[in-house]
Image (cartoon, coloured by chain):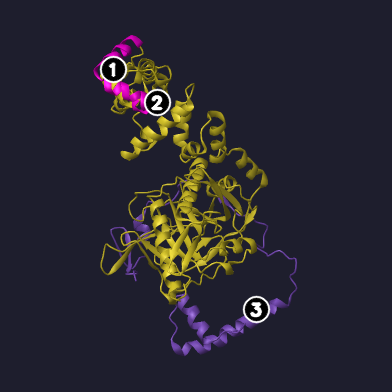
Amino acid sequence: MAIDAATVRKVARLARIAEPEERIEPLVQELNGILQWIEQLAEVDTDGVEPLTSVVHATLTLRDDVVTDGGDAARVLSNAPKSTDGFYVVPKVVE
Amino acid sequence: MTNAFTLKGRTGDWEIVLGLEVHAQVASNSKLFSGAAVGFGAGPNEQVSLVDAAMPGMLPVLNKYCVEQAVRTGLGLKAQINLKSRFDRKNYFYPDLPQGYQISQFEFPIVGEGEVIVDRIDGTSFTVRIERLHLEQDAGKSIHDLDPKATYVDLNRSGTALMEIVSKPDMRSPEDAAAYVKKLRAILITLGTCDGDMEKGNLRADVNVSVCRPGDYEKFRETGSFSHLGTRCEIKNVNSYRFIQQAINVEARRQIEILEDGGKVDQETRLYDPTKNETRSMRSKEEAHDYRYFPDPDLLPLVLDPAWVKEIEAGLPELPDAKKARLMADYGLSAYDASVLISDGEVAAFFEEAAKGRDAKLVANWTLNDLLGRLGKDGLEITASPISAADIGALVGLIEDGTISGKIARTVFEHMWDGEGAPAAIVEKHGLVQITDTGAIETAVDALIAANPDKAAAVKEKPQAIGWFVGQVMKETGGKANPAAVNEILKAKLGL
């Protein structure tokens, strides 16, 4: 799979990363290099091999259904660039 | 289906095909992946943990109770329980989704294929196949009307556990779609896995609508190929039975218009606006969905112990279908009455309490027609009924033993509604005991015939005119005469 400039622009946009136009072509080179590197893995025959989900023999931890958190709006909002009356305030998102 | 629901277009008949994605909020204390409280009415951002706010470095830990509820629901839908399932990230950008992705289940949901048997109002039923049920996080809430230039975000709902229940495209009319949601809701409430509160948005539906020509749907069911069906549009977040039906009707009409003008329906997400009764496109084209699902690296696959699933299965309550069959068998109720009773577990329980030792059909009539009708008028649930189940039973008892007629029972019912107490006491207090003394009725009948010789003669030619006499006798006796006795005496005296 080869990545072109349009794909780089699309991925940047989906990730909300602003990339100046002069960075697009270098990124095409870099990302294609990385992908080629990773594609070498496809040479290994993995037929019948279960995907590895953890390098240790761990199972998913489950917790009991009890309230142990929350109730501190001020803390939650402390990093927000803007907040009012307990709400986050963001630029208008209605179309 | 022989009588398929059709819409008439300029170029002929159209049929509709409907599939639903129902989002049911799990009735849990805390969120799917955090220990923050789930609930309605808290102040903004008061029920938010740093996990829900997606602070860097916070890790999700799965709520065992939510997993159990998904399994319970799956079992209630007679569905396959997948002992191994996986959580994936569904990526999209929106301010009320602080992670930038929703944790959901894409490739390997916890519950696979099942089915729901849906009852129609006419007493017939049909099957809706369930494709899957998966667990996922809800988003927060954006409020757009507090400020002309800004959107306010409350993350209280963010991270709340939802069960998304996806049906196959098995519904063919707006009524069937609403009936399916009704039945699904009854199952969820019976299981206790979701409170079913649609007003609060705890149960809401995304409706997939497409239109096709008669015969196309049958080809689709035969071959399984979607090429026989039209392009579908998804109407997001419809939260009442009425809106579901209205949205389907108006959306199907819109698609038919486009197709008949030679156009093409675009597959897209739309929003139903009840005030304008129209659907409109939700996201602009450049925002086209590109969710880039991938396995959530913060969560290992979910593996269920088969013994635990068995244990959950053993603890299932009597489900609506089993209850319906039992009500029909044990009480001799019609399919229709039984399906209305099971649509709300509380109503069924009320009925069974009232029907103890009574004429079950009479109790069903009084419960469904009189009591539910009256409750509906006042917007009350059966749990808030001013008349107890025992008193409905006692009222039917008075009708059964001939103390009062069905007509007087209506009067007694009104007094019961007004909180005057037990029916027997009301009958006594208001002197409503039915006159079964044939002497008194005979006297009234004799007087009536003597005063109306012409009518008495006419009734011999037209026996149905006896109704007038019955009415007059009932009027004479203040409605307290036993109607059966009145009929019998009238027939004898009039020579019918």
x and y percentages locating residue B41 in the rendered image: 34, 49
Query: Looking at the image, which residue is at 75% across and 66% down?
Result: A48
Which chain is yellow in the rendering?
Answer: B
Q: Mark 2 and mark 1 in contact? Answer it, CB < 8 Å.
A: no
x and y percentages locating residue A82 in the rendered image: 31, 66
Three-letter code for the amino acid on which mark 1 is drawn: Ile
x and y percentages locating residue B135 in the rendered image: 53, 55
Residue at mark 3: chain: A
Three-letter code for the amino acid on which mark 2 is drawn: Ile
Residue A38 badge = 3
Residue B449 badge = 1
- Which tint is chain A? purple
At label 3, counting other C-alpha atoms closer than 10 Å, the crowd grade (few under 14, some 14-19, many 20 or more) is few
Residue ID for mark 2? B392
Query: Looking at the image, which residue is at 48% across and 44% down?
Result: B122
At label 1, counting other C-alpha atoms closer than 10 Å, the crowd grade (few under 14, some 14-19, many 20 or more) is some
Query: Looking at the image, which residue is at 47% across and 34% down?
Result: B348
- Quick one: label 2 or label 1, which is nearer the N terminus? 2
In this orientation, which residue lies closer to the viewer: B126 or A73? B126
Q: Which is closer to the viewer, label 1 or label 3?
A: 1
Cα distance between the residues tagged 2 and 1? 38 Å
